[in-house]
Image (cartoon, rainbow, N blue to C red):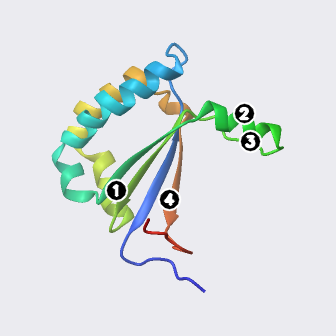
């Protein structure tokens, strides 16, 4: 039976765009603008091992609905990886994050609808190809 990794954790946040923004503009801004803003702050560079964005795929979403899967109506998923949750949380409580990143998030995110999920990592299998 695979074990939960002890060397790192993840925080996954389901994101919702502002209602005034269309999906394409949301994905474009998040991928090209916000990623640079977020990645530029010192605590992120120091504390995170990985930051990934998972952008929604409307065609796959519709296919899942057609075969009966309930689906999350989110626009994307941010995935943060670090050696501990404390290291991740330090990013979100940092003064530079609050001054630089939060105002940028407010341009494209409906922060009140976003949902966070702290996740221990269990690698069942991992194909390196």
Q: Is mark 2 on a helix, strand or loop?
A: helix
The residue that disc 2 covers is 62
Q: Which residue is at the front of the view, 16 or 95?
A: 16
Alpha-carbon span between mark 4 and mark 1: 10 Å
Q: Which of marks 2 and 1 is in front?
A: 2
Q: In which quarter of the image is residue 125?
A: bottom right
Q: Name the residue under label 1.
A: 88
Q: Give whichever of discs 4 and 3 has the lower sequence position.
A: 3
Crowd band around label 2 with a 10 angstrom C-alpha radius: few (<14), some (14–19), many (20+): few
Q: Is residue 5 left or right of residue 88?
A: right
Choose the circle earlier in sequence order: 2 or 1.
Answer: 2
Q: Earlier in the sequence, mark 4 or mark 1?
A: 1
Q: Which residue lies furthest to the bottom in this view?
A: 1
Is residue 75 among the parts visible in the rendering?
yes
Residue sitting at 74 percent across and 42 percent down? 64
Q: Quadrant of the C terminus?
A: bottom left
């Amino acid at each position: 039976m695979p074990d939960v990794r002890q060397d790192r954790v993840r925080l996954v946040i389901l994101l919702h765009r502002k209602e005034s923004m269309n999906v394409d503009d949301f994905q474009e801004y998040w991928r090209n603008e916000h990623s640079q803003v977020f990645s530029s702050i010192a605590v992120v560079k120091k504390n995170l091992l990985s930051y990934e964005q998972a952008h929604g795929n409307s065609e796959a979403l519709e296919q899942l609905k057609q075969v009966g899967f309930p689906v999350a109506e989110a626009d994307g998923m941010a995935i943060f990886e670090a050696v501990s949750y404390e290291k991740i949380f330090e990013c979100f409580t940092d003064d530079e994050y609050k001054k630089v990143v939060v105002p940028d998030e407010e341009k494209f995110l409906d922060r009140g609808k976003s949902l966070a999920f702290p996740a221990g990592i269990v690698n069942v299998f991992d194909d390196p190809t």
